[in-house]
Image (cartoon, coloured by chain):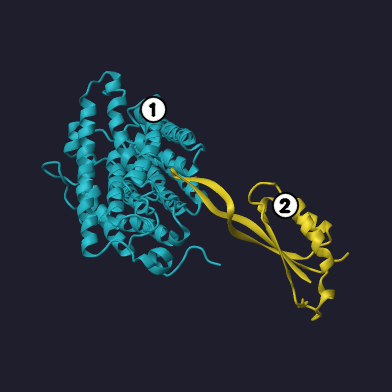
Chain colours: A yellow, B cyan
Amino acid sequence: MKKIEAIVRQTHFEEIKQALFDADINWFSYAEVKAIGQDREDRIYRGVMYSTDIISRIEITIVCREQFVEPAIQAIMKAGRTGEVGDGRIFVSPVDDTWSIRTGEHGDEVLRDKK
Amino acid sequence: MNEIALSLDTVWMLLAAMLVFWMQPGFALCEAGLTRSKNTANILMKNFVDFIFGSIIFFFVGFGLMFGNDGDGFVGMPNWGDLSFYKGNLPVEGFLMFQTVFCATSATIVSGAMAERTKFSTYLIYSAIISLFIYPIEGHWTWGGGWLGKMGFHDFAGSAIVHSVGGVLALIGAMALGPRRGKYGKDGRSRAIPGHNLTLASLGVFILWMGWFGFNPGSQLAASGEVNRLAISHVFLTTNLAAAAGGAATLFVTWIKYGKPSLSMMLNGILAGLVGVTAGCDVVSPVGALLIGLTCGTVLVFAIELIDHKLHIDDPVGAASVHGVCGILGTLMTGLLAVDGGLLYGGGWKMLGVQSFGILVIDLWAAVCGVILFYGIRKVKGLRVESRVEEEGLDVYEHGESCYNG
């Protein structure tokens, strides 16, 4: 079991979501996050020009079995890339266990990352 | 006078009073939108107390100071709640209502400039004082039959009397307070503190624009007969054209200066045009009104930059630039563009001279009162909240409730 965390552009969320479905990932969570990185957004407010390094992104969190990790990563890379600064990052880490709150089952079988 | 005509005039005056009252929520939304969400309850409440205290105090004292009889034209007599002194044709209670909403407009201009850092208790003192005598006394000079009016000073609906006085007090209040924490960096550069909701601010400005259709045409104080129906229609048009021109000017000036058309600035630009045309809306031509709007909307951008970037006076909503600078500008431009008597229409320098003198004494009065009031309070009681309160927001610390929950 692995956890994939990806910080991606808000504008590409719909495409990434569809690409993940196509890669058989149909259970994940996401959140709107504020991020700081190399991207800058220029703003003007009442005559003061400034650039903000605080930018809005979406963080997707996926927990899946080993064989789905690579396809999921490829899906995010393909659907989320523009080539400009600010496309985001993907992090992969091991997960010890997974429990289903409803049934009380745990382990690999709980993950519904299969057709 | 004809009974029906008088009734028509009264209805028009009361309808206009309702529209001017509607400017209070306009100001409230505009100011709330241009400031941060942690101070929203505070700024809304300040807008309410301006009207609450203004209504009561103006009824008891201010109305008499402004319209009561006197010998030398400097100040009327406090009426102590007695309205029987008034000798005009219009019903005195309706006339009082109409004047009350004007007084409250002048008072509420200041809350935006002093937003996000003023003690609420201190603000109450200011709010009471302006309605008690600052506004009524200078108002008496022109509108109450006083000496400025007799000189021929022309301020139809209050560019000088209402707006510039509020604007000057706003500037001095903001100066006495000092800037919000974090407004100026260590290098002295101005930082942006974006308002939390430009949708609210925009609604506020639309409401103010609408309210001005009572503010200016209502100041005719009559609707019956050919003269009056032509006059209120003319004022309606000049008011709207100036607002549109003010907005257009600011839109294009910011587009050229900053590369993008700025909404937060254009909102001020519309108000700048409205404030500017208020003095001369009855005597300038529609093209003259356009010129006033264009000038005010252009000057506004530079006024905001001067006050913010150079003078380092932190005015979160631009009240000093909109109401102060453009109030003065509009009063002076009346002397240029009045069809009858204006300099550009061959009327000579006399009217421009009187306009200049009038705006000078009115704003000198406001400035002296403002300095004594705000710097006095600062010495005796303190104007500002503690830095911790300012950081966490006035809503929670000053009022114990916040606007946005859940």
Residue A28 position in % (x across, y down): 75, 65
Q: Residue furthest top?
A: B346
Is residue B134 shown left or right of residue B10? left
Q: Residue at x 63, y 56 (%)?
A: A57
Instruction: Point out which mark residue A69 bears.
Output: none
Q: Are marks 2 and 1 on the same chain?
A: no
Determine if residue B95 is in view: no
> Badge 1 is on which residue?
B291
Marker count (numbered): 2
User: Is B36 drawn above or below residue B329 in the view shown?
Assistant: below
A64, A105: nearer the viewer: A64
**Based on the displayed image, in which of its 4 quarters is residue B209 positioned?**
top left
Q: Residue at x 50, y 52 (%)?
A: B197
User: Is B5 drawn above or below residue A85 in the view shown?
Assistant: above
The chain letter for the residue carrying disc 2 is A
Is residue B312 shown left or right of residue A108? left
Q: Secondary structure at mark 1?
A: helix
Q: Residue at x 48, y 33 (%)?
A: B256
Residues at circles 2 and 1 in contact by the CB criterion of under 8 Å: no
Q: CA distance from mark 2 to mark 1?
A: 51 Å
**Based on the displayed image, in which of its 4 quarters is residue B214 positioned?**
top left
> Badge 2 is on which residue?
A80
The chain letter for the residue carrying disc 1 is B
Q: Nearer the viewer, mark 2 or mark 1?
A: 2
Q: Residue at x 22, y 56 (%)?
A: B375
**Based on the displayed image, in which of its 4 quarters is residue B221 positioned?**
top left
Is residue A34 shown left or right of residue B355? right
